[in-house]
Amino acid sequence: MSAAESGLPLVRDVMDVPAASLREDLPYRDIARSLAREHAGALPVVDAEDHVVGVVSESDLLAKVAFEASGHRPGPIGRLRERRIHGKAIGDLAADLMTSPAITVLPGATVAEAAWLAALSRLKRMPVTDREGRLVGVVGRDALLQSLIRDDAGIRTEVEAAIAGYCPPGDRENVEVAVHDGIVELTGRMPSATLARLVAEVEEISDVVEVKNLLTAA
C-alpha cells in the first residue's frame, strides 16, 4: 500500500512552498543575511538546476566567523571532528561551508516517516525534493509535530460530528470514540439501521487509517 492509499498525512500537505535556498557560490556574509531574513537556522544549498547539494546552518557560520576572528587551528592531535570543522571554516562560499550530502525527504512521504527522520537526524527543517533531487519545499519539525498531534484530535471531531448526524440525541451517549495514530475505535450501541452507514462514512474521513468497529446493534 502506498503512502497516499494509507490515508496518512503526507509531507506535501504540511511543507512550506516556496522554499528559500542558497546558491553554491554565495559568500558567507550573504549566507548570514539570508538566514536572518528567513528566520531560519539552516537553508538548503542548490546548484544551477535546483538540485539540493547540501545545507548550511548557523553552526557552520559560527565556525567560520570564529576562525576569521581568532585564526583558531586544530592541534596536531586534534579530534577528527575538529579537523573537519576547520576544513570547512577556511572556505568562503556556501559550497565550502555546507554539510553534504543533505538529508532530504520526498513530498509523498508520510508525516510520520518525515518526523522519524527529523528526530534521528536532529534537524529542525528538512529540504523536500522531487525524485530527481530538485528542491520543491521545506518542512519544519514544528509542522510535523502539529500535524501528528492535530490528526487524531481532528479525526475524533469529525467522527463525533458523523455520529451526531446519524444518531438521535438520546443515542449519541451510547457510542464512544477513541482515536490513536489514525486508528478509530467505535464502541457502544446504536440503531442497526444506521450502524453500517456510520462505519462506512468514518472509513472515508481523511487520515483515517483503520476503523475498529466494536459497536453492537441496538
Image (spheres, grey):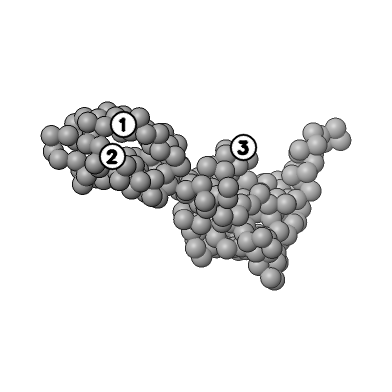
Kindly report the distance in space between the C-alpha atoms of the residues bearing marks 2 and 1: 8 Å
* Residue 203: image location, x then y, percent: 39, 45
Q: Is residue 193 above or below residue 45?
A: above
Q: Is residue 97 left or right of residue 59?
A: right
Q: Is residue 28 visible?
A: yes
Quadrant of the image occupied by residue 49: bottom right
Q: Is residue 215 left or right of residue 100?
A: left
Q: Residue furthest right?
A: 76
Identify the residue shown where x is 55% and y is 60%. 137
Identify the residue shown where x is 48% and y is 46%. 8
Callout 1 amino acid: Leu
Callout 3 amino acid: Leu
Per the rendering, the mark at residue 215 is: 1
Label 2's element?
A: helix
Mark with earlier residue (3, 1): 3
* Residue 35: image location, x then y, percent: 55, 57
Per the rendering, the mark at residue 195 is: 2
Callout 2 amino acid: Leu
Residue closer to the observer: 190 or 34:
190
Residue under circle 3? 120
Kindly report the distance in space between the C-alpha atoms of the residues bearing marks 3 and 2: 43 Å
Label 3's element?
A: helix
Foreground label between 3 and 1: 1
Identify the residue shown where x is 19% and y is 35%. 172
Q: Is residue 33 visible?
A: no
Q: Is residue 193 left or right of residue 136?
A: left
How many neighbours does mark 2 have within 10 angstroms: few (below 14), some (14-19), or many (20 or more)?
A: some
Report if the CB atoms under discs 2 and 1 are less than 8 Å apart: yes
Kindly report the distance in space between the C-alpha atoms of the residues bearing marks 3 and 1: 40 Å
